[in-house]
Image (cartoon, rainbow, N blue to C red):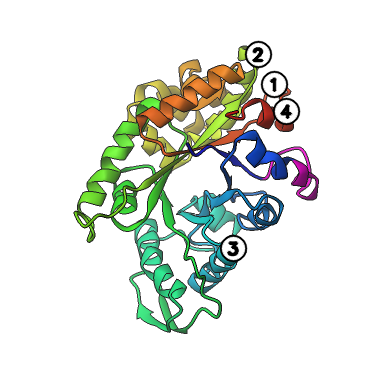
Amino acid sequence: MAYGITVPFDGSSLLEQWELIRRLPDLGYTDAWSSEAEGTDAFTPLALAAAWAPGLRLGTAIVPVFTRGPALLAQSAAALAEAAPGRFALGLGTSSPVVVEGWNAMSFDRPLARVRDLLAFLPLAFAGGRVEQDFETFSVHGYRLGRPPASPPPLLVAALRPGMLRLAGRAADGVILNWLSAADVPRALAEVRAGAAAGPAAGEGRPAPEVVARLFVCPSTDTETVRAQAKRLLSVYLNIPAYAAFHEWLGRGSLLAETWAAWRAGDRRAATSAVPDVVVDDLVLHGHPDQIRERVQAYVEAGVTTPVLAVLPLAGVDVGHAVEDLAPG
Protein backbone atom coordinates (compact mmCIF):
# COMPACT_ATOMS: atom_id res chain seq x y z
CA MET A 1 0.00 0.00 0.00
CA ALA A 2 1.17 3.53 -0.74
CA TYR A 3 1.83 5.49 2.44
CA GLY A 4 3.03 9.04 2.10
CA ILE A 5 4.27 11.91 4.23
CA THR A 6 4.28 15.66 3.64
CA VAL A 7 7.67 17.37 3.28
CA PRO A 8 9.38 19.52 4.36
CA PHE A 9 8.85 19.04 8.07
CA ASP A 10 8.20 21.87 10.50
CA GLY A 11 10.81 22.74 13.10
CA SER A 12 14.09 22.48 11.18
CA SER A 13 15.76 23.85 8.07
CA LEU A 14 15.65 22.03 4.75
CA LEU A 15 19.26 20.90 4.95
CA GLU A 16 18.78 19.56 8.48
CA GLN A 17 16.07 17.20 7.25
CA TRP A 18 18.25 15.06 5.02
CA GLU A 19 18.74 12.26 7.55
CA LEU A 20 15.04 11.82 8.31
CA ILE A 21 14.08 11.99 4.65
CA ARG A 22 16.80 9.46 3.81
CA ARG A 23 15.24 7.07 6.36
CA LEU A 24 11.66 7.38 5.13
CA PRO A 25 11.76 4.26 2.89
CA ASP A 26 13.24 2.19 5.73
CA LEU A 27 10.41 3.40 7.99
CA GLY A 28 7.87 2.16 5.45
CA TYR A 29 6.92 5.38 3.70
CA THR A 30 6.56 5.05 -0.07
CA ASP A 31 5.83 8.66 -1.00
CA ALA A 32 6.87 12.22 -0.14
CA TRP A 33 4.50 15.01 -1.18
CA SER A 34 5.05 18.75 -0.93
CA SER A 35 2.69 21.70 -0.71
CA GLU A 36 2.98 25.37 -1.59
CA ALA A 37 1.47 28.33 0.24
CA GLU A 38 3.50 30.66 2.48
CA GLY A 39 6.48 28.36 3.16
CA THR A 40 8.75 26.59 0.68
CA ASP A 41 7.90 26.26 -2.98
CA ALA A 42 6.60 22.86 -4.04
CA PHE A 43 9.60 21.75 -6.09
CA THR A 44 12.73 22.42 -4.02
CA PRO A 45 11.96 19.99 -1.14
CA LEU A 46 11.19 17.25 -3.68
CA ALA A 47 14.42 17.90 -5.59
CA LEU A 48 16.32 17.36 -2.34
CA ALA A 49 14.29 14.24 -1.56
CA ALA A 50 15.00 12.89 -5.05
CA ALA A 51 18.71 12.95 -4.21
CA TRP A 52 18.49 11.91 -0.56
CA ALA A 53 15.96 9.06 -0.91
CA PRO A 54 15.96 7.66 -4.46
CA GLY A 55 13.39 5.02 -3.48
CA LEU A 56 10.63 7.51 -2.73
CA ARG A 57 7.87 8.48 -5.10
CA LEU A 58 7.42 12.25 -5.14
CA GLY A 59 4.42 14.47 -5.69
CA THR A 60 3.18 18.04 -5.41
CA ALA A 61 -0.02 18.65 -3.48
CA ILE A 62 -0.28 21.17 -4.85
CA VAL A 63 1.29 23.59 -7.30
CA PRO A 64 -1.07 26.55 -7.85
CA VAL A 65 -2.12 26.94 -11.48
CA PHE A 66 -2.09 30.75 -11.41
CA THR A 67 1.28 31.62 -9.89
CA ARG A 68 3.46 30.27 -12.73
CA GLY A 69 3.06 30.73 -16.44
CA PRO A 70 2.33 27.60 -18.49
CA ALA A 71 5.88 27.30 -19.87
CA LEU A 72 7.57 27.79 -16.49
CA LEU A 73 5.26 25.22 -14.91
CA ALA A 74 6.14 22.73 -17.65
CA GLN A 75 9.86 23.41 -17.19
CA SER A 76 9.73 22.99 -13.39
CA ALA A 77 7.78 19.75 -13.65
CA ALA A 78 9.98 18.38 -16.44
CA ALA A 79 13.15 19.09 -14.47
CA LEU A 80 11.88 17.17 -11.46
CA ALA A 81 10.64 14.34 -13.68
CA GLU A 82 14.17 14.17 -15.11
CA ALA A 83 15.69 14.13 -11.61
CA ALA A 84 13.31 11.36 -10.47
CA PRO A 85 12.35 9.45 -13.63
CA GLY A 86 9.12 7.54 -13.22
CA ARG A 87 8.82 8.66 -9.60
CA PHE A 88 7.17 12.07 -9.83
CA ALA A 89 3.50 13.08 -9.99
CA LEU A 90 2.43 16.67 -10.66
CA GLY A 91 -0.51 17.73 -8.53
CA LEU A 92 -2.21 20.94 -9.64
CA GLY A 93 -4.76 23.08 -7.83
CA THR A 94 -6.31 26.51 -7.84
CA SER A 95 -5.06 27.60 -4.40
CA SER A 96 -7.07 30.63 -3.18
CA PRO A 97 -7.57 34.32 -3.95
CA VAL A 98 -5.49 35.22 -0.88
CA VAL A 99 -2.44 33.38 -2.24
CA VAL A 100 -2.97 34.20 -5.90
CA GLU A 101 -4.17 37.81 -5.74
CA GLY A 102 -3.14 39.03 -2.31
CA TRP A 103 0.35 37.53 -2.23
CA ASN A 104 1.31 37.05 -5.87
CA ALA A 105 -0.49 39.91 -7.65
CA MET A 106 -2.09 37.51 -10.14
CA SER A 107 -5.71 37.36 -11.21
CA PHE A 108 -7.78 34.52 -9.73
CA ASP A 109 -10.08 34.20 -12.72
CA ARG A 110 -12.04 31.19 -14.00
CA PRO A 111 -10.19 28.57 -11.95
CA LEU A 112 -11.93 25.51 -13.41
CA ALA A 113 -11.12 26.61 -16.96
CA ARG A 114 -7.51 27.39 -16.02
CA VAL A 115 -6.99 23.90 -14.62
CA ARG A 116 -8.66 22.34 -17.66
CA ASP A 117 -6.43 24.31 -20.04
CA LEU A 118 -3.25 23.31 -18.22
CA LEU A 119 -4.31 19.66 -18.32
CA ALA A 120 -4.47 20.08 -22.11
CA PHE A 121 -1.25 22.10 -22.47
CA LEU A 122 1.15 20.15 -20.25
CA PRO A 123 1.06 16.83 -22.17
CA LEU A 124 1.75 18.77 -25.36
CA ALA A 125 4.75 20.44 -23.73
CA PHE A 126 6.06 17.20 -22.23
CA ALA A 127 5.91 15.56 -25.66
CA GLY A 128 8.56 18.01 -26.85
CA GLY A 129 6.72 19.41 -29.85
CA ARG A 130 6.20 23.05 -30.71
CA VAL A 131 3.09 24.41 -28.98
CA GLU A 132 1.17 26.97 -30.98
CA GLN A 133 -2.31 27.13 -29.51
CA ASP A 134 -4.94 29.45 -28.09
CA PHE A 135 -6.49 27.91 -25.01
CA GLU A 136 -9.55 29.40 -23.35
CA THR A 137 -7.66 31.11 -20.50
CA PHE A 138 -4.21 31.62 -22.03
CA SER A 139 -2.32 31.35 -25.31
CA VAL A 140 1.04 29.72 -25.95
CA HIS A 141 2.85 30.55 -29.19
CA GLY A 142 6.14 29.22 -30.43
CA TYR A 143 7.08 27.31 -27.27
CA ARG A 144 9.04 24.07 -27.26
CA LEU A 145 10.22 22.43 -24.02
CA GLY A 146 13.99 22.12 -24.33
CA ARG A 147 14.33 19.03 -22.13
CA PRO A 148 11.18 16.93 -22.47
CA PRO A 149 11.06 14.23 -19.79
CA ALA A 150 11.56 10.62 -20.80
CA SER A 151 8.86 9.73 -18.27
CA PRO A 152 6.21 12.48 -18.31
CA PRO A 153 4.65 12.86 -14.87
CA PRO A 154 1.04 11.88 -14.29
CA LEU A 155 -1.22 14.88 -13.69
CA LEU A 156 -3.47 15.04 -10.65
CA VAL A 157 -6.00 17.70 -9.70
CA ALA A 158 -6.84 18.93 -6.22
CA ALA A 159 -10.60 19.11 -6.07
CA LEU A 160 -13.34 19.91 -3.59
CA ARG A 161 -16.73 20.15 -5.25
CA PRO A 162 -18.44 18.42 -8.20
CA GLY A 163 -17.12 20.56 -11.07
CA MET A 164 -13.43 20.10 -10.24
CA LEU A 165 -13.91 16.53 -9.02
CA ARG A 166 -15.49 15.60 -12.36
CA LEU A 167 -12.73 17.38 -14.25
CA ALA A 168 -10.15 15.35 -12.32
CA GLY A 169 -11.90 12.15 -13.28
CA ARG A 170 -12.40 13.16 -16.90
CA ALA A 171 -9.11 14.79 -17.83
CA ALA A 172 -6.44 13.94 -15.24
CA ASP A 173 -4.70 10.84 -13.95
CA GLY A 174 -6.01 11.28 -10.43
CA VAL A 175 -7.46 13.51 -7.75
CA ILE A 176 -6.09 15.04 -4.55
CA LEU A 177 -8.49 15.35 -1.62
CA ASN A 178 -7.97 17.59 1.37
CA TRP A 179 -9.64 18.45 4.70
CA LEU A 180 -12.30 15.76 4.67
CA SER A 181 -13.22 12.74 6.77
CA ALA A 182 -13.12 9.11 5.70
CA ALA A 183 -16.93 9.17 5.64
CA ASP A 184 -16.79 12.04 3.12
CA VAL A 185 -14.59 10.19 0.64
CA PRO A 186 -17.31 8.15 -1.14
CA ARG A 187 -19.29 11.27 -1.97
CA ALA A 188 -16.24 12.94 -3.52
CA LEU A 189 -15.25 9.81 -5.43
CA ALA A 190 -18.73 9.40 -6.89
CA GLU A 191 -18.13 12.67 -8.73
CA VAL A 192 -14.63 11.63 -9.83
CA ARG A 193 -15.98 8.37 -11.22
CA ALA A 194 -18.80 10.20 -12.99
CA GLY A 195 -16.21 12.37 -14.67
CA ALA A 196 -14.10 9.37 -15.62
CA ALA A 197 -17.12 7.64 -17.13
CA ALA A 198 -17.75 10.68 -19.32
CA GLY A 199 -14.12 11.10 -20.37
CA PRO A 200 -12.78 10.56 -23.88
CA ALA A 201 -10.96 7.34 -22.91
CA ALA A 202 -13.85 5.81 -20.95
CA GLY A 203 -14.29 2.14 -21.65
CA GLU A 204 -10.90 1.79 -23.35
CA GLY A 205 -8.94 0.23 -20.49
CA ARG A 206 -8.04 3.56 -18.92
CA PRO A 207 -6.60 3.03 -15.43
CA ALA A 208 -8.76 4.04 -12.50
CA PRO A 209 -7.83 7.51 -11.22
CA GLU A 210 -5.31 7.68 -8.40
CA VAL A 211 -6.86 9.05 -5.22
CA VAL A 212 -4.46 11.00 -3.01
CA ALA A 213 -5.71 12.33 0.33
CA ARG A 214 -3.72 14.69 2.54
CA LEU A 215 -4.53 13.65 6.11
CA PHE A 216 -3.72 16.05 8.94
CA VAL A 217 -2.44 14.10 11.92
CA CYS A 218 -1.24 14.78 15.44
CA PRO A 219 -0.07 11.80 17.54
CA SER A 220 -0.99 13.19 20.93
CA THR A 221 -3.38 11.91 23.57
CA ASP A 222 -3.78 15.42 25.02
CA THR A 223 -7.18 15.72 23.40
CA GLU A 224 -8.18 19.01 24.98
CA THR A 225 -5.02 20.83 23.85
CA VAL A 226 -5.07 19.33 20.36
CA ARG A 227 -8.68 20.38 19.85
CA ALA A 228 -8.10 23.90 21.15
CA GLN A 229 -5.07 24.46 18.93
CA ALA A 230 -6.59 22.74 15.89
CA LYS A 231 -9.62 25.04 16.07
CA ARG A 232 -7.37 28.04 15.38
CA LEU A 233 -6.17 26.39 12.18
CA LEU A 234 -9.57 25.12 11.16
CA SER A 235 -11.33 28.42 11.75
CA VAL A 236 -9.14 29.93 9.04
CA TYR A 237 -9.53 27.12 6.52
CA LEU A 238 -13.24 26.63 7.06
CA ASN A 239 -13.87 30.30 6.36
CA ILE A 240 -12.06 30.32 3.03
CA PRO A 241 -15.03 30.52 0.64
CA ALA A 242 -14.08 27.41 -1.34
CA TYR A 243 -13.73 25.30 1.81
CA ALA A 244 -16.89 26.74 3.33
CA ALA A 245 -18.80 25.76 0.19
CA PHE A 246 -17.12 22.34 0.24
CA HIS A 247 -18.25 21.57 3.77
CA GLU A 248 -21.70 22.97 3.06
CA TRP A 249 -21.86 20.48 0.19
CA LEU A 250 -20.64 17.68 2.47
CA GLY A 251 -23.47 18.42 4.90
CA ARG A 252 -21.69 20.33 7.69
CA GLY A 253 -23.58 23.57 7.16
CA SER A 254 -25.55 23.43 10.39
CA LEU A 255 -22.44 22.46 12.39
CA LEU A 256 -20.44 25.38 11.02
CA ALA A 257 -23.13 28.05 10.83
CA GLU A 258 -22.02 29.68 14.09
CA THR A 259 -18.34 29.91 13.17
CA TRP A 260 -19.19 31.29 9.74
CA ALA A 261 -21.47 33.95 11.25
CA ALA A 262 -18.83 35.01 13.79
CA TRP A 263 -16.18 35.22 11.07
CA ARG A 264 -18.40 37.39 8.87
CA ALA A 265 -18.97 39.66 11.88
CA GLY A 266 -15.22 40.06 12.30
CA ASP A 267 -15.04 38.18 15.61
CA ARG A 268 -12.16 35.79 15.00
CA ARG A 269 -12.02 34.59 18.61
CA ALA A 270 -15.69 33.63 18.59
CA ALA A 271 -15.29 31.97 15.19
CA THR A 272 -12.48 29.83 16.57
CA SER A 273 -14.31 28.77 19.71
CA ALA A 274 -17.43 27.95 17.67
CA VAL A 275 -15.70 25.22 15.64
CA PRO A 276 -17.37 22.07 17.03
CA ASP A 277 -15.24 19.33 18.58
CA VAL A 278 -16.86 16.81 16.25
CA VAL A 279 -15.56 18.75 13.22
CA VAL A 280 -12.05 18.81 14.67
CA ASP A 281 -12.22 15.09 15.28
CA ASP A 282 -13.49 14.49 11.74
CA LEU A 283 -10.75 16.49 10.03
CA VAL A 284 -7.70 16.05 12.29
CA LEU A 285 -6.55 12.53 13.13
CA HIS A 286 -5.26 12.65 16.69
CA GLY A 287 -4.64 10.24 19.54
CA HIS A 288 -2.26 7.32 19.94
CA PRO A 289 -0.32 6.42 16.75
CA ASP A 290 -2.15 3.08 16.55
CA GLN A 291 -5.48 4.92 16.58
CA ILE A 292 -4.29 7.20 13.81
CA ARG A 293 -3.14 4.27 11.68
CA GLU A 294 -6.59 2.70 12.09
CA ARG A 295 -8.19 5.92 10.89
CA VAL A 296 -5.82 6.11 7.92
CA GLN A 297 -6.92 2.59 7.02
CA ALA A 298 -10.54 3.80 7.07
CA TYR A 299 -9.66 6.27 4.30
CA VAL A 300 -8.08 3.48 2.28
CA GLU A 301 -11.17 1.33 2.71
CA ALA A 302 -13.27 4.30 1.54
CA GLY A 303 -11.31 4.48 -1.73
CA VAL A 304 -8.12 6.46 -1.09
CA THR A 305 -5.19 4.83 -2.88
CA THR A 306 -2.45 7.13 -1.58
CA PRO A 307 -2.84 8.48 1.96
CA VAL A 308 -0.38 11.29 2.65
CA LEU A 309 0.11 12.31 6.27
CA ALA A 310 0.72 15.95 7.19
CA VAL A 311 1.97 16.20 10.76
CA LEU A 312 0.55 19.08 12.78
CA PRO A 313 2.93 20.07 15.60
CA LEU A 314 0.13 20.65 18.12
CA ALA A 315 0.29 20.00 21.86
CA GLY A 316 4.08 20.05 21.82
CA VAL A 317 4.40 17.16 19.36
CA ASP A 318 7.90 16.76 17.92
CA VAL A 319 7.54 16.34 14.17
CA GLY A 320 10.55 14.06 13.74
CA HIS A 321 9.36 11.71 16.46
CA ALA A 322 5.85 11.81 15.01
CA VAL A 323 7.11 10.75 11.59
CA GLU A 324 8.78 7.74 13.20
CA ASP A 325 5.81 6.93 15.45
CA LEU A 326 3.31 7.07 12.59
CA ALA A 327 5.32 4.94 10.17
CA PRO A 328 3.39 1.97 8.80
CA GLY A 329 6.09 -0.45 9.95
The structure residue drawn at horizontal position 64% and vertical position 49%, both measured from the top left corner, is: 38
Q: Amino acid at mark 3?
A: Leu
Q: Earlier in the sequence, mark 4 or mark 3?
A: 3
Is residue 275 something one can see in this rendering?
no
- The image position of residue 245, as x and y in percent, is 37, 38
Q: In the image, which residues are magenta?
A: 8-19
The answer for how far apart the CA atoms under marks 4 and 3 are is 29 Å
The crowding category of the residue bearing disc 1, from other C-alpha atoms within 10 Å (few below 14, some 14 to 19, many at least 20), is some
Q: Secondary structure at mark 4?
A: helix
Mark 1 and mark 2 in contact? Answer it, CB < 8 Å. yes
Identify the residue under disc 1.
315
Give the residue pinned by disc 3.
80
Closer to the chain start, of discs 1 and 4, is 1
Q: Earlier in the sequence, mark 2 or mark 4?
A: 2
Mark 2 lies on a secondary structure that is loop
The kind of residue tagged 2 is Asp
Residue identified by numbered label 4: 321
**Mark positioned earlier in the residue sequence (3 or 2):** 3
Residue at (36%, 34%) from the top-left corner?
303
Q: Pick the residue in front: 252 or 89.
A: 89
Q: Position of 53 compared to 134: left or right? A: right
State yes or no: residue 15 in magenta: yes
Q: Position of residue 84 (x, y in %)?
A: 59, 60
